[in-house]
Image: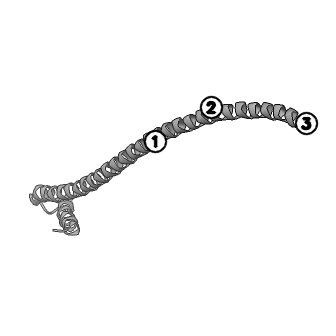
Amino acid sequence: MTDDQLRQLADECLAIVDNPYSGQQQSTKLLQAQLYMNELDRRHDESIADRDYDMAVRSSKMEKAVIWLIGVEILIGVIGIWFGIVEGNKQARILDDMKTSTGCNCFDAHNSGEHLKHDKRKYC
């Protein structure tokens, strides 16, 4: 039976109860009307439970997706920090090599300048 049919049957039972000439049928019709209304309530509660379950499943899927995305973000951050440390160490080695090489070049330039002065005196 559909919900509309159940409502119609409950209304018919209650209409008979409202009739003062119905006599002993009143208690029977009241129980029948209560039965129909309880069935309507049960169906309504079942539809609400189904809707709530579907919402819970959807929420659970969304929470899992968000947790997964946070994990990916953390992983990318850790990889970025690791690459930063590796690149920083490479740059530090290069700067140390440049410092050593620049120091040698300055010393060589200073010494070659001294040689030029001495050579100049010879030719002048």
Does residue 120 appear left or right of residue 48 in this picture?
Answer: right
- Disc 3, disc 2: CB below 8 Å? no
Tell which circle, 3 or 1, labels the residue nearer the N-terminal end.
1
Query: What amino acid type is highlighted by mark number 3?
Result: Cys
Considering the numbered disc 3 on the image, is that residue within a helix, a strand or a loop? loop
Quadrant in the picture for residue 106: top right
**Looking at the rendering, in which quadrant would you find the N terminus?**
bottom left
Amino acid of disc 2 = Thr
Q: Nearer the viewer, residue 19 or 112?
A: 112
SS at mark 1 in the image: helix
Label 2 crowd bin: few (<14), some (14–19), many (20+), radius 10 Å: few
The residue shown at (17%, 63%) is 13
Q: Tell me if residue 22 comes above or below residue 86 in the rendering.
A: below
Mark 2 lies on residue: 100
Q: Quadrant of the C terminus?
A: top right
Name the residue carrying label 1. 77
The residue at 19%/63% (across/down) is: 10
Q: Is residue 122 left or right of residue 47?
A: right
The relative height of residue 67 versus residue 8 in the rendered view (above or below) is above
Q: Residues within 10 Å of mark 1 (few under 14, many from 20)?
A: few
Viewer-nearest of labels 3 and 2?
Answer: 3
Q: Position of residue 6 (x, y in %)?
A: 19, 65
**Residue highlighted by disc 3:** 124
Residue found 59% across the figure and 35% down from its top: 97
Q: Nearer the viewer, residue 10 or 111?
A: 111
Question: Vertically, is 91 above or below 52?
Answer: above
